[in-house]
Each structure stands twice: as structure tokens, then as C-alpha cells.
Image (spheres, helix red, strand yellow):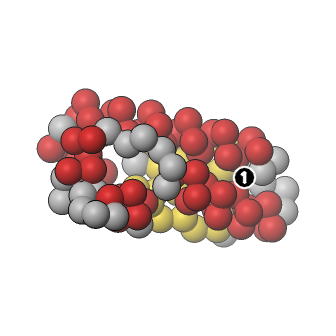
Amino acid sequence: MAAFLYVSGHVVLQAWDEAVLGRALALLHGAVADSVAAAGGYVVAATEGGAVAVFGQAGAAVAWAVACQERLMTLAWPEELLEHDYGGGATANTRLCSRVQLCIA
């Protein structure tokens, strides 16, 4: 079972500030790797705007998707990113994390 994670708008953010996006993607990929391992899966590809993980069972992939979203909500994202139109506002983490799309196939 494969699960895909994609950050919509990462190209816009890269054009805006590549260094800030780099710090944010480092946080994202660290959280993905930790949560995939905890769910018994493996990261098989990591890109600038996403990742692909595989799991032995569909339930593990779904559990990972939920745990990953919850983990992303707790990360200390770069302040500059939270102030950007793609991530700012009173609910910055919620708005930013809504840009992370998860698909299980």
C-alpha cells in the first residue's frame, strides 16, 4: 500500500524564499520519516514538495496519514512561513497543514 504526501504551493514558496522553505521542508521530512517508521512503513521517495511511503497494510497507511497530520500541527514552523499568505493568520498551523495533501493508493 502506497501513501503520498504533497505540499501544494511549494513552488510558490520556493520562489518567495528558498531558505525558509528549505527549513520547513527539513521539518516536514523529519516528521514524515519518524511517523512512517512508527507506523511500520518505509519512505521510498522524498522530493522537494512531498514524499512516498509504503506500508504492508491499508490500515497502517491510514494510521500514518492521521498521525502525520497531527504531528505536522505541532511542529515549530519558521515564523516567516507562518506570516506568508500560504501559512499565516490566527490558525497558522491549521492553514499551513491544510496545504499538505495525503493520498493512499
Residue at 32% x, 58% y: name it.
92
- The answer to which of 38 and 57 lies nearer the viewer is 38
Residue 48, placed above or below residue 5:
above
Task: Please say if 29 is above or below 61.
Answer: above
Residue 6 is situated, as x and y percent measured from the top left of the image, at 45, 57
x, y (%) of residue 9? Answer: 28, 58
* Amino acid of disc 1: Val
Label 1 crowd (10 A; few <14 / some 14-19 / many >=20): many
Q: Which residue is mark 1?
A: 54
Please give the name of the residue rendered at 32% of the width and 39% of the height, measured from the top-left corner.
Answer: 78
**Residue 21 position within the rendered picture, expressed as x and y whole percent measured from the top left:** 30, 39
In this view of the protein, which residue sits in the foreground, 64 or 51?
64
Q: Quadrant of residue 55?
A: bottom right
Q: Residue furthest left?
A: 16
Q: How many marks?
A: 1
Write the residue at 66% across / 39% down.
Answer: 34
Residue 82: x, y in percent?
27, 50
Outermost residue on the right side: it is 56
Q: Is residue 43 above or below residue 23?
A: below
Write the residue at 56% across / 59% down: 69
Frontmost residue, 35 versus 91: 91
